[in-house]
Image (cartoon, helix red, strand yellow):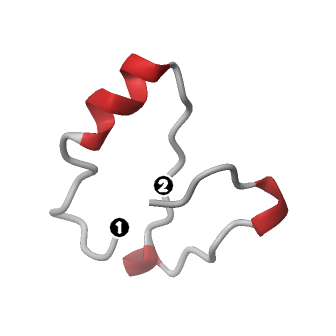
Amino acid sequence: MHVPFEGPGIILDWIGEKGHKLHYTRFYQGDALPDTSAVDLLI
């Protein structure tokens, strides 16, 4: 996420319906991207 006032939006519902896990990268807090070998899908 780029700014604190933007959330994941409707994608959060889809992720829940499909039984996936969601992890956030908060760029505005200086978070680094996760190791690509640990990522199944990047939105």
User: Residue visible at 54% across and 28% down?
Assistant: 20
- Asked if the residues shown at circle 2 and circle 1 are in contact, with their CB atoms under 8 angstroms apart, the answer is yes
* Mark positioned earlier in the residue sequence (2 or 1): 1
Viewer-proximal residue, 7 or 13? 13
33 sits to left or right of 3? right
Where is 19 relative to 28, above or below? above
Residue occupied by mark 2: 24
CA neighbours of label 1 inside 10 A, class few (<14), some (14 to 19), many (20+): some
Disc 1 designates what residue?
1
- At 84% from the left edge and 61% from the top edge, which residue is drawn? 37
Q: Which mark is residue 21?
A: none
Residue sitting nearer the eye, 31 or 41: 41
Q: Position of residue 36 (x, y in %)?
A: 76, 67
Q: Quadrant of residue 39?
A: bottom right
User: In this view of the protein, which residue sits in the foreground, 40 or 31?
Assistant: 40
- Rendered location of residue 7, percent (x, y): 23, 53
